[in-house]
Image (cartoon, helix red, strand yellow):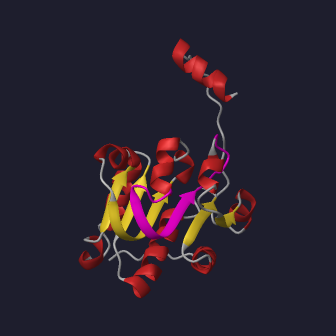
Amino acid sequence: TTMIQIDEKRLARQNEGIDKWEASNYNGIINWYPGVGKTYGAILAIQRYEKLHKSNYIISVPNDVIYKQWLKTLEHFPVHLKQRIIVKTKGQLHSEKLSYKDVGLFIVDEIHEYTTELDEKLLDKTIIEHKAFLALTGTTNRVNFKNVLKHYKIVDEISEYEAKSKGFVAEMIEYNWALDLDSKDAKTYENYT
């Protein structure tokens, strides 16, 4: 058997963030620097919510890569709980033309990718009627993030400084590579700079 090393200091800080989410009536956004463990924070939130509310859960993700990561994560959940967790991409939720009732906890991973008017229908309970809400992000520096903040507030933040100074993430090295861009990509790049 392989033993998993638990970083007790990081776990304590993740629990502190989930405590703040609980204190906000189980509604809010955690903005943790990438690598701190947002997915694990969401798992802690599900465990806590489940103790009190035996509920149904929906996890919405922005793309197929994160969708597959969540399915792999859920493989480790007990069957009785896994059966009540639905994972969908936001594209699936938008195209289904369904509404979900009686959802206990709605989790949105990478909430900074949910800033369009169409995405607002996921956040404002039009498509998913939920009692509790947890959103995960590593950045709020996105166009139209104010649309998200109309619905939910940030309840906890772990900055780059905190993450690095407490050893939650390693120092990163950034490499700049010269790339030839076609005209479409060059235009997109111009819009970002």
When asked about the image quadrant of residue 70, the answer is bottom left
Residue 136 rendering spot, x and y as whole percentages: 54, 60
Answer left or right for 56 relative to 143.
left
Quarter of the image with the C terminus in it: top right
Residue at the farthest bottom position? 52
Residue at the farthest top position? 183
State yes or no: residue 129 in magenta: yes
Q: With respect to residue 151, does 97 lie above or below?
A: above
Residue at 34% over, 72% down: 56
Answer left or right for 87 relative to 141.
left
Residue at 66% over, 21% down: 190
Residue 179 appearing in the image: no
Residue 152 rendering spot, x and y as whole percentages: 60, 62
Q: Which residues are magenta?
A: 124-143
Residue 163 rendering spot, x and y as whole percentages: 68, 63
Residue at 33% over, 57% down: 99
Q: With respect to residue 82, does 29 lie above or below?
A: above
When asked about the image quadrant of residue 185, the answer is top right
Residue 100 rendering spot, x and y as whole percentages: 33, 61
Residue 187 appearing in the image: yes
Q: With respect to residue 94, does 166 lie above or below?
A: below
The front one of 57 and 165 is 57
The front one of 51 and 178 is 51
Answer left or right for 77 relative to 28.
left
Q: How many marks?
A: 0
The front one of 62 and 25 is 25
Quarter of the image with the N terminus in it: bottom left
Answer left or right for 144 relative to 61.
right
Residue at 34% over, 66% down: 101
